Image (cartoon, rainbow, N blue to C red):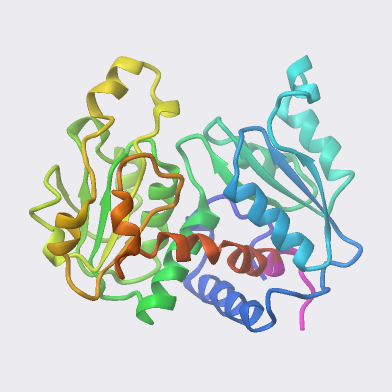
Amino acid sequence: MLPKHVISSLDLSKEEIELIFDEADRYEKLNRTSKELEGKVVALAFFEPSTRTRNSFDSAVQRMGGRTIGFSSSEGTSVEKGETIADTVRMLESYSDLIVMRHKLDGAAKFASEISKVPIINAGDGKHEHPTQALIDLYTVRKVKGYIDGLNFCVLGDLKYGRAVNSLLRLLTKFKPGKVFLVSPQQLRIRTEVKDTLNFPVIETDSLQDVIDMTDVLYVTRIQKERFADEIEFEKVKESYKVDISTVNSMRKDSMILHPLPRVNEIDRRVDKLPQAKYFYQASLGVQVRMGVIHQVIGDSR
């Protein structure tokens, strides 16, 4: 079983990650259906709006026979009346067996885990982490390539504010990647406190062209307007990179492109039809991976 809470990629051992991947494979074979959560309730506490993450958790719980309660933004809840995170968590823990939580503040999920009597799964907190997205990312790599160790990764875009990037890089510390290229504008370089948690060397550059032909997995991220306090700073970097047909032509034939979605203009729509484009396949795997996580946290042992 996993630790009681899943807050950071660093909470997971390699053995636990591989167990989740194996469970995801098992649920795929079962057509993503089980009854192991019958009688259990999962609270989806999304203080920050989300489409894919919330719906895939909702689908995962229902496909396991459980029920969900909760909210999809703080609008219309007691939070708008001034209720604290602590009080909201204490309320939800009395109604549910598990809380899946997303919040705009760094550390909100960690704080919740310190007071909650039921497990907390971090579904994204500020610019901090999004561990289940990272699990989906590396599960997709394993599904497509069959292995993770030794592959060269290139992470492109907003490395400063991107929580999915932070979690992916931290999850990679449990494996043995080949070269890891970090490509971003100077203003969006990876933060020191994240870089210091990595146990492999990274190569930082602002030139995708210099590293694209050495890349096995190109991980593209959106430059997130909502993370910038100053819109002028966002305008300076918002279209720094675009993956287009010429980019893909420079890639290895067996390489792959991932993106946590949603995208804006950072990937040309014409790339979608190319064999390297795996981001919609990646999104499709979200439900079974999250079923695997939930199974490890509160599901029944077989």
- Residue at horizontal 38 percent and vertical 49 percent from the top: 165
- Classify residue 75 as left or right of residue 247: right
Q: Quadrant of residue 66?
A: bottom right
Q: Could you say where residue 22 lies in the image, as x and y percent from the top left?
A: 57, 80
Give the side of residue 19 with respect to residue 247, left or right: right
Residue at 77% from the left image edge and 37% from the top image edge? 89
**Is residue 252 or residue 296 the one in the foreground?**
252
Foreground residue, 52 or 296?
52
Write the residue at 65% across / 48% down.
54
- 50 relative to 22, above or below: above
Query: Residue 70 at x, y = what percent?
Result: 79, 41
Q: Quadrant of the C terminus?
A: bottom right
Residue sitting nearer the eye, 240 or 45: 240
The x, y position of residue 120, in whole percent, is 69, 49
Residue 248 shows in the view: yes
Q: Which residues are magenta?
A: 295-302
Q: What quarter of the picture does the N terminus occupy?
A: bottom right
Does 176 appear above or below 112? below
Q: Is residue 285 left or right of residue 117?
A: left
Residue 283 percent coordinates (x, y):
50, 59
